[in-house]
Amino acid sequence: MKAKDLIEKLSEIPFIRLRKQSKFHDTIDFFWNATGKSELYTLFPQTKEIRQMTSGELNNIWCVRSPDDNLIYYGSDVGGNEQFAAFQLALSTKEILQLSSSYEFDESPSDISPDGKFLLLLSKRSGQTNLFKMDLATKKVTQLTDQKNPFWGYALWSVKDWIYYSANDTDNRRNLDIWAVRANGKENHLLYRFSPDSREWVLDLSKDGNYLVVDTNGKKTRQAGVLNLTKNEITWFGNEQYDEKPKAISRDNSKLLTIRFKGLERIPVVYDVQTGEEHILNVKGVVIEGTFCLNDNYVVYARSDPKTPMSLALYNLLTDEEEIILKPELGIPDEQLINGTDITYPSFDGLKVPAVLYKPKIERGEKAPALMFHPGGPGGQLSLLFLPILQILSQLGFVILGPSPRGSTGFGMEYLKANVKDLGGGDAMDYVYGKNYLESLPYVDSNRIGVFGGSYGGYMTYILMTKYAEYNWAAGAAMYGITHWKTVYDEFPLDYKQFFEGLLGKYKENKELWEDRSPLNHVDKVNAPILMIQGVNDPRCTISQSRLFKQKLLDLGKQEGIDFEYHEFGDVGHGGREVRKAIEENKLLVDFFLRKLK
């Protein structure tokens, strides 16, 4: 199959994302971009009917359904700039009403009151992100919280008129605790803190308002917990062998669903809330989201593996049988697909780095070009799931190695925190030693090894092509990456500023580190071609980052079109959301590596 046809077929494969489910409904809402745009669909588990609910209205997968099932509340931005306004969509008439008076508040719905009269908003109306409620009859907005630091995650509204959320009121940038505020805003207090240096997230709330599902990174591994709100007692699940992320508590409060990070797989586990007994679901690959349905006897989830696109599945807990409800068609023969292999390799300090290896069909005696891929982050993990661009490149003859370097999620807290105050240090060397691993393979051409990635993967590409250029990368493609930490920090809102201070420390006290780990300061070392792809509206890796890097290349006498290639997308933020944008981006990437390495 020609590269162009392969890119279009695989890039068009729709991606399924389950949204946070409400305890008020017996239906399952999910997002699917089968039309080319992200649309809301509803699964009726009893009949397995799937119904499309929207027609191009949504560009954000964060939405709230009213208790009477008639209305959807969601946040929408302009051109991917992530400055949201709240909207209301009537499902019966498709009428859309903008609820926010301005996009500058950057506000999105988080939950709705049990009676459907008030919408809970995350908003910057007070300057930084806090919780507000909107009276849906009068559109009057009332501030509920006034936290010292920006709000994180989402908030859940209990039938008992308490609202639970995660926030940090300390000077420790790596802290996050569980808080509670009365729905009238008159009482707000710290509910639970594991330690001053840990992070606890609110993940789910029981239908009766008696149990709050949380997790913590304060232990050896990330663990799931259930907080009994009537007794103020917490029960932790798991034995600290694996990271686990809680997803849902059953309606009768007897079961807790978690996702267990086991190597590069993510496996659903159902715990008995009273006894702690675990039921490991017989599922392979990667499960992203899930929840209970059909009288808590079934779990519905989205799952994938390297040869299977994200699919919607229903699991019978009584018989341990899985039924695939929705599986996208690939349009190419199954035997043409390349399977990813779970491997590890040693890094500079002996640390075993987990990675996915894709080996294409290679004739005996031939040596293939290779690429290293970064999944994004910081904290990202490349799991055993289907990624179109990795299938495309491997089917075109590239060996692909996708590490989960130190700092990645899913391998315990020591591994996750290993790149704190070391971004672009040990994790970058994990890539250098990944290159060494590729060079040791008899079917890889050691002179044709490149690197690519987006977001933090874009940063990793920039730092490897500059500070670590001596390791002779043959080419690199950076998609919406950071090139100078202080410049992008100055453009960040307060929540992003504090997030990166938790990883790099404050600039005044750690200036040497910030500057040393900024690729812009090492551009003079570039010795191989670079492709840069950037969205003009990107709020996270801002347009200044790629433009500064491009200008520095030009100042050093590098020629555009020969030494580097540069592409901006005017109506795109932090990566393209629409299928047509993914196709454009993938075509640029594939064409570049075919010309430079193949």
Image (cartoon, rainbow, N blue to C red):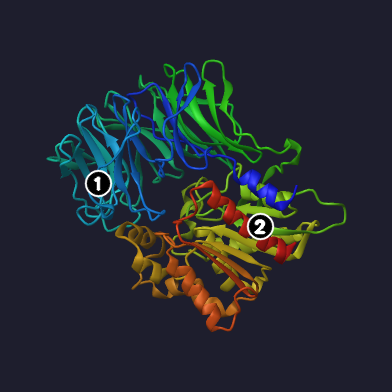
Question: Residue at position x 48%, y 52% from top?
Answer: 379
Is residue 83 shown left or right of residue 291?
Answer: left
Depicted 238 relative to depicted 355: above or below: above
**Amino acid type of disc 2?**
Val
Q: Give the CA distance from mark 1 to mark 2.
A: 41 Å
Q: Secondary structure at mark 1?
A: loop
Is residue 389 shown left or right of residue 378?
Answer: right
Q: Secondary structure at mark 2?
A: helix
Is residue 376 shown left or right of residue 563?
Answer: left
Mark 1 — residue?
100
Which of the two residues, 151 or 537, is positioned nearer the viewer here? 537
Mark sitting on residue 590:
2
Mark sitting on residue 431:
none
Question: Residue at position x 42%, y 16% from top?
Answer: 295
Placement of the C terminus among the 4 image quadrants: bottom right
Question: Residue at position x 50%, y 30% from top?
Answer: 301
Which of the two residues, 401 or 58, is positioned nearer the viewer here? 58
**Residue 117 x, y percent position in the rendering:** 20, 31
For the question of whether residue 205 can be seen, the reply is yes
**Residue 213 x, y percent position in the rendering:** 35, 33
Of marks 1 and 2, which one's residue comes earlier in the chain? Answer: 1
Is residue 210 shown left or right of residue 13?
Answer: left
Q: Quadrant of residue 66?
A: top left
Pick out the residue farthest to the right.
365
Question: Residue at position x 21%, y 51% from top?
Answer: 147
The total number of labels drawn is 2
**Amino acid type of disc 1?**
Ser
Look at discs 1 and 2 and give the one toward the viewer: 1
**Residue 261 x, y percent position in the rendering:** 53, 40
**Residue 227 x, y percent position in the rendering:** 31, 32
